[in-house]
Amino acid sequence: MQHPTCHAALVAYLREHATLTVTAQEADSPIEGNVLASGDDEEDRRAEDEVRSSLEFTVWAWATVTVTAELAGFKGRDYLGACSYASEDAFRVDGDYIDMIDFALGSLADEIISAKVSITALAEILAE
């Protein structure tokens, strides 16, 4: 298990140096029953119709979003499915985006630390 301070320091470093990318693809989950759960069937149907209509113009209307943090060939990712935004810009100002960045950076740090542990173990084996 890694020392939490080392992980936190690596995440802080990655926050400044990793490349972040955001991608969206049409969500696999059905729109019906997944857009709104207001308790009012008519309101829910209107929201679903609005999403269907918006899909003609932007994938962000019903998307699975991936935030990827990358450095030196290592990658960390976070995913959010069945979400609806007017645009990528609208997604980027939403709190989910900040949370996804944090998760992707943490995942990237985990990948780097795991690689370091593996390389250290391999070096010890080779030194024998």
Image (cartoon, grey):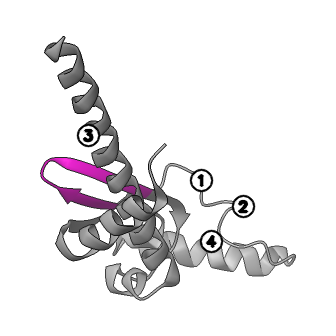
Q: CA distance from mark 3 to mark 4?
A: 47 Å
Which mark lies nearer to you, 3 or 4?
3
What is the x, y in percent for residue 56? 37, 70
Q: Secondary structure at mark 4?
A: helix
**Residues marked 2 and 1 touching at CB (< 8 Å):** yes
3D distance between C-alphas at marks 2 and 1: 7 Å
Q: Secondary structure at mark 1?
A: loop
Residue 69 magenta-drawn? yes
Instruction: Name which residue type carries label 4.
Output: Glu
Eye-nearest disc, 1 or 3? 3
Q: Which residue is farthest right?
A: 39
Q: Are marks 3 and 4 in contact (CB under 8 Å)?
A: no
Q: CA distance from mark 3 to mark 2?
A: 45 Å
Instruction: Give the mark, 1 or 4, whose residue is nearer the N terminus.
Output: 1
Q: Which residue is mark 2?
A: 33
Q: Residue at point 51% right, 69% down?
A: 52
Q: Say what amino acid the circle numbered 2 marks.
A: Gly
Q: Residues within 10 Å of mark 1 (few under 14, many from 20)?
A: few
Q: Is residue 61 positioned above or below 119 on the image?
A: below
Observer-nearest residue: 97 or 113?
113
What's the amino acid at mark 1? Answer: Pro
Q: CA distance from mark 1 to mark 3?
A: 41 Å
- In magenta segment, residue 59: no
